[in-house]
């Protein structure tokens, strides 16, 4: 190992220092993540704390098996069409007081329905404006009434994450909300660089690693500067960044690096903490106990939501009184093998079990912390899947879908939106010819309305909502779906 001496450090040129420091930081944060840091911090939005947590289910979650009607007539319609995919009525986690039940793999969420924190929202999807089946059938090719590349994974993911019907939109509705509301931090992601958190001047959300990971500049963090060479390196870098830069690009790069050091020092300990560590939080650890094995979280969703729980608990250290988080789970493209030997087993059941258990642990942690009314968690997904199964024990791409919203401020214990008519070729099904009667529901609520309800609770006014959600103006006074 070549240990730098003080003389060697002082002989390095400015270009060498910037190159070396930049390479170190890029390795710690990821090149795309660093891009947003040039803006520096912004004033906090408000005095009270609130957080939104988006969970994106990539691949197209089969919402028709997430929330199932339990009244005799509609359940029989459901069972007749779904065939082998139909969940036995006796297996459903009954949403008491309603005519619906959850997939049994989501049973961990039922107590939050009972306590008034959980609300299903029916048949949501990208819409330019309210749309009937007749308008859909009569729309010419290229009509703005029809979302771009309808039924396409990549395009519908973009439209859900951006809150538009234009698949070329670059910024996400979470990112635009962050900008319009002036949050201190960008969208904070524990699930990669989703489009949801992208802003105009911030090319990616702040992406954090999982629990136990190092977040920061290797060899230059507070714990590393006890070693004299590292302390001297850090002093030299701080001195160089403190000097005026003659070029705008140099100023931006200096601000980016300075903010990166500051952010890593502020968040590193939170990110690194694992269940049972000396600095972990018992209120969080106890809530996540069902998912902790040998001191670690046993599922990806558990790891992501545990990380967010720690950040919310330390919201003053994270900074800002409005925080937006992003997590994700993949694998929902269930064209085949959606079920196993029966409808209670298989890929979809496994995915929902991981999702439901992690969401339940997360919500319990917020309850334990006394922060449940301050946080609202919601799902999104590419699209729903066909009501009718295909020939390979799976489902195909559709449109409208059901989402789950949970939080202490949610008007839970009730369902929202309009459940589609369970009739192939009926008024909610885009199909007309016999070959296309598959149950691809035309959404009766838009992503804009769904997001507007969340952001209205978050603190956005009407003018701000219209800047964040460009199609919202087409829905008149029906901007709020009522679940918050």
Image (cartoon, helix red, strand yellow):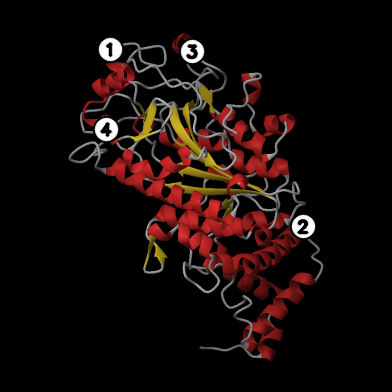
Instruction: Decide: is 426 above or below 469.
Output: above
Tell me which label, 3 or 4, sits earlier in the chain.
Answer: 4
- Mark carried by residue 344: none
CA distance for labels 1 and 2: 62 Å
Report x, y in % for residue 446.
54, 26
In front: label 3 or label 1? 3
Q: Secondary structure at mark 2?
A: helix
Query: Marks 3 and 2: which is nearer the front?
Result: 3
The answer to whether 141 appears left or right of 238 in the picture is left
Per the image, label 3 sits on a secondary structure element best described as: loop
For label 3, count other residues whose C-alpha is less than 10 Å away and answer few (under 14), some (14-19) or many (20+): some
Judging from the image, what secondary structure is the residue with disc 4 in? Answer: helix
Q: CA distance from mark 3 to mark 4?
A: 35 Å
Cα gap from disc 3 to disc 2, whole angstroms: 52 Å
Q: Quadrant of residue 130?
A: top right
Residue 152 in sight in this render: yes
Residue depth check, mark 4 versus mark 1: number of the one nearer the observer = 4
Which tag, 4 or 1, sits closer to the chain's start?
4
* In the foreground, 484 or 62: 484
Q: Are marks 3 and 4 in contact (CB under 8 Å)?
A: no
x 52%, y 69%: residue: 214
Point out the tag, 4 or 2, that comes first from the N-terminus: 4
Could you say where residue 92 lies in the image, as x and y percent from the top left? 32, 34
Residue at image mark 2:
248
**Mark toward the start of the polypeptide (3 vs 1):** 3
- The Cα–Cα distance between marks 4 and 2, rounded to whole angstroms, is 66 Å
Asked whether 336 or 313 is in front, the reply is 313
Residue 468 image offset from top left, x and y in percent: 66, 34
**Distance of label 3 from label 1 (alpha carbons):** 19 Å
Disc 1 secondary structure class: helix
Q: Which residue is mark 1?
A: 434
Identify residue for label 3: 132
């Amino acid at each position: 190992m070549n240990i730098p001496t003080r003389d060697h450090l002082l002989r390095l040129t400015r270009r060498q220092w910037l190159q070396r420091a930049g390479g170190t930081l890029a390795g710690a944060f990821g090149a795309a993540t660093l891009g947003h840091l040039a803006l520096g911090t912004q004033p906090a939005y408000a005095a009270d704390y609130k957080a939104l947590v988006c969970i994106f289910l990539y691949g197209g979650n089969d919402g028709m098996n997430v929330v199932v009607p339990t009244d005799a007539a509609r359940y029989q319609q459901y069972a007749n069409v779904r065939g082998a995919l139909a969940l036995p009525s006796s297996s459903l986690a009954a949403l008491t007081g309603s005519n619906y039940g959850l997939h049994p793999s989501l049973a961990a969420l039922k107590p939050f329905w009972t306590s008034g924190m959980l609300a299903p929202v029916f048949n949501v999807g990208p819409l330019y404006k309210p749309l009937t089946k007749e308008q859909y059938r009569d729309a010419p090719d290229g009509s703005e009434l029809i979302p771009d590349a309808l039924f396409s994974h990549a395009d519908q993911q973009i439209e859900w994450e951006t809150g538009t019907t234009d698949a070329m939109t670059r910024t996400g509705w979470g990112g635009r909300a962050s900008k319009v509301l002036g949050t201190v931090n960008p969208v904070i992601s524990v699930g990669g660089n989703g489009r949801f958190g992208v802003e105009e001047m911030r090319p990616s959300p702040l992406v954090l690693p999982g629990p136990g990971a190092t977040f920061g500049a290797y060899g230059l963090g507070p714990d590393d500067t006890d070693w004299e060479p590292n302390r001297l390196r850090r002093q030299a870098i701080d001195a160089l960044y403190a000097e005026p830069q003659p070029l705008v690009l140099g100023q931006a790069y200096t601000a980016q690096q300075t903010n990166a050091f500051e952010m890593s020092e502020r968040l590193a300990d939170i990110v690194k903490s694992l269940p049972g560590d000396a600095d972990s939080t018992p209120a969080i650890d106890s809530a996540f106990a069902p998912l902790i094995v040998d001191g670690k979280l046993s599922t990806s969703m558990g790891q992501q939501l545990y990380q967010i729980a720690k950040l919310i608990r330390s919201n003053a250290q994270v900074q800002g009184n409005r925080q937006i988080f992003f997590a994700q789970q993949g694998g929902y493209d269930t064209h085949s093998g959606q079920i196993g030997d029966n409808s209670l087993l298989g890929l979809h059941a496994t995915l929902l079990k991981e999702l439901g258990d992690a969401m339940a642990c997360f919500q319990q942690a917020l309850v334990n912390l006394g922060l449940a009314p301050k946080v609202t968690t919601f799902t999104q997904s590419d699209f729903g899947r066909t009501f009718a199964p295909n020939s390979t024990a799976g489902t195909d791409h559709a449109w409208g879908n059901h989402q789950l919203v949970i939080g202490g401020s949610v008007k839970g214990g009730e369902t929202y939106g309009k459940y589609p008519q369970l009739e192939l070729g009926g008024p909610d099904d885009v199909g007309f010819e016999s070959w296309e009667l598959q149950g691809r529901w035309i959404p009766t609520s838009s992503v804009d309305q769904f997001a507007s309800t969340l952001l209205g609770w978050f603190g956005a006014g009407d003018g701000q909502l219209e800047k964040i959600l460009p199609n919202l103006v087409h829905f008149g006074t029906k901007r709020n779906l009522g679940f918050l």
